[in-house]
Amino acid sequence: MKYFLLIAIFIIKIQAGVLDFKSLQSDFTQTITNDENSTITYTGTFYATAANQALWIYKSPIKKSVYFDGNHVAIVEPELEQVIMTTLQRSPNLTQIIADAKKMHHDTYKATYENTDYFINIKNDTIQDIHYKDKLDNHVVIHLKNLQKNIILDATLFQVKIPEGYDVIDQ
């Protein structure tokens, strides 16, 4: 019985360790496909901390930055010269989704957030992609590349930078 308990604890620690992190940095490709099979692909860089801070820097086809901090979200859109301030009730927090994920199969984890199921695929103990259907029934795949875990990220990275002259919209 003692050996069974030790083995069970060891297995739980191994499984939890794959998604445990203090910080993440990764390049990403986000593909959104609607029900008419029309697809748009975004690329950029993603940063996150276990303290519920995240920054998505979209580089193409449009530039924008999405800051997550606790329950607040700020979306900086240079092409529109505006910043949208909103709350997490309207935007999913990938950091929390990863933290809440439970193992389903050998390399697949699942988390549910705001009635949406998120599936996380792992390969060689590294997150490969996350996929889900959004509230508009679009199929979304976020593929992570060059993922780095537990690196030091400067805290100022997560401070919203609002350029002078931009409109600020509260939602």
Image: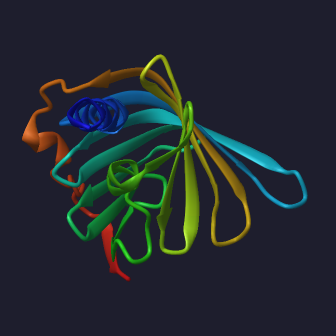
Q: Residue furthest front?
A: 1
Colour convention: rainbow
- Picture quarter containing residue 90? bottom left
Instruction: Give the residue displayed 31% in from the left and 63% down from the top.
Output: 74
Between 122 and 50, the residue placed more toward the observer is 122
Instruction: Give the residue displayed 20% in from the left and 35% down from the top.
Output: 2
Where's residue 14, x and y in %? 32, 29
Between 147 and 156, the residue placed more toward the observer is 147
Q: Residue furthest bottom?
A: 171
Quadrant for the N terminus in the image: top left
Above or below residue 50? Residue 91 is below
Above or below residue 89? Residue 91 is above
Instruction: Give the residue displayed 28% in from the left and 58% down from the top.
Output: 68
* Number of numbered callouts drawn: 0
Where's residue 77, x and y in %? 42, 56
Between 2 and 123, the residue placed more toward the observer is 2
Where's residue 134, x and y in %? 63, 64
Instruction: Give the residue displayed 10% in from the left and 34% down from the top.
Output: 154
- Picture quarter containing residue 19? top left
Above or below residue 19? Residue 52 is below
Where's residue 26, x and y in %? 39, 28
